[in-house]
Image: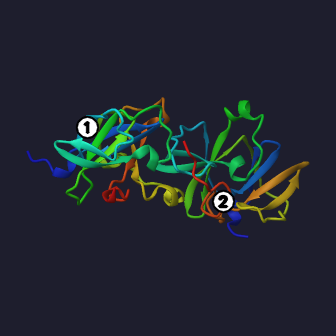
Amino acid sequence: MNGAARCGLTLARLGPDLVGLDLSRVLAVLESPPITALPRIPECCEGITVWQGRAIPVYDLKKALNLPSAGDDNIRRDSVVIVGRWRSSAVGLRVDEVLGVLESGAPEPSGGGRPGLRGEAWHDGRRLLVLDPDADYPGSPGAQGASPRAA
Amino acid sequence: MSVAAGSFARLLVLFRLGHHRFALPAENVVEICEAPEGALGAGSFQHRERALPVVDLRERFLVEGAGEPRAVLVTMPPGSSHPIALLVDEVDGVVPFGAESLLELPDPLHPFLGGYLQGLCIVPGETGGDAEGVVAVLGLGSLGIGDA
């Protein structure tokens, strides 16, 4: 375990599931940031937004994790983007809502095997998908959803 | 009073491919022309008594456009003496930009766009509406169109 001062898991809702990202990797939470769509990028990438003078890619986490998105169109309008450090870059991760921080007692994920995930656990009766921000970038060659979008 | 050459604003030619907004530094653009009928199928574009190779940028960027391209950008790739005709859907205008407006392409997108773009640019006066006025700046040198 590293970074005892910022230990914990940021919890967000992603449809019926929960998603967790190490608190130490969370840089900001943006509400409805403007997105510039780009061609030739992976299906799971919505485009870029400008954050602190930098262009950062914004990923639809549901698509990146191959989760169903049907029926969430109304919720999506209110969704937020977590800016996090993924590998060495700042990226935006779209989730339905940020719920808070699980500072202690975070369940130990198990299973893994899915690109971008450290593993899965259960929390408050819901499936918790724990992200692995050291994995390949979402949609990168070899990862899920890597095929470029035809606009 | 002297003004350092670097302080002069450069110009960007703004254009569209489908609903995507792009730009090209004006110093790379020789002329903006109306696209002739059938330009898409033609292998060359007649410009000042020269037949120039044509590049359909919609095809390069996998973008679907509505109908025929309406404009041709006659461009001169850096370090080349051979102009190239780029087919685009529409030219939006010319705007000044400064170095502070340029944004690097994010690392995660390099595998997909690094060979096509030289970066991104925040366009002045375009806030609100379509994505805060960020446009993709075409990389002529890396687009491989010098060989077209």
Q: What is the number of callouts on the image? A: 2
Going by the picture, which residue comes out furthest to the right? Answer: A125
Quote the CA–CA distance across marks 1 and 2: 50 Å
Report the amino acid beneath label 1. Answer: Ile
Dot 1 falls on which chain? B
Q: Is residue B65 left or right of residue A46?
A: left
Q: Are marks 1 and 2 on the same chain?
A: no
Residue at 72%, 30% in the rendered image: A74
Report the amino acid beneath label 2. Answer: Ser
Residue B146, quarter of the rendered image: bottom left
The type of colouring in the image is rainbow
Q: Quadrant of the N terminus of chain B?
A: top left
- State the residue in front, B42 or B70: B42
- State the residue in front, A40 or B146: B146
Q: Is residue A75 visible?
A: yes
Q: Position of residue B138 (x, y in %)?
A: 37, 49
- Residue that carries the numbered disc 2 in the rendered image: A24
The numbered mark at residue A19 is none
Q: Which of pointers 1 and 2 indicates the residue nearer the eye?
A: 1
Tag 2 secondary structure: helix
- State the residue in front, A90 or A116: A116
Residue at 66%, 54% in the rendered image: A145
Q: Position of residue A113 (x, y in %)?
A: 78, 65
Q: Position of residue B56 (x, y in %)?
A: 39, 45
Instruction: Estimate how packed mark 2 is, as few (under 14), some (14 to 19) or many (20 or more) residues with alpha carbons within 10 Å.
Output: some
Residue at 83%, 63% in the rendered image: A109
Q: Is residue A19 left or right of residue B135?
A: right
Q: Position of residue B101 (x, y in %)?
A: 36, 45
Q: Quadrant of the C terminus of chain B?
A: bottom left
B92 lies above or below B144: above
Tag 1 secondary structure: strand
- Residue that carries the numbered disc 1 in the rendered image: B32
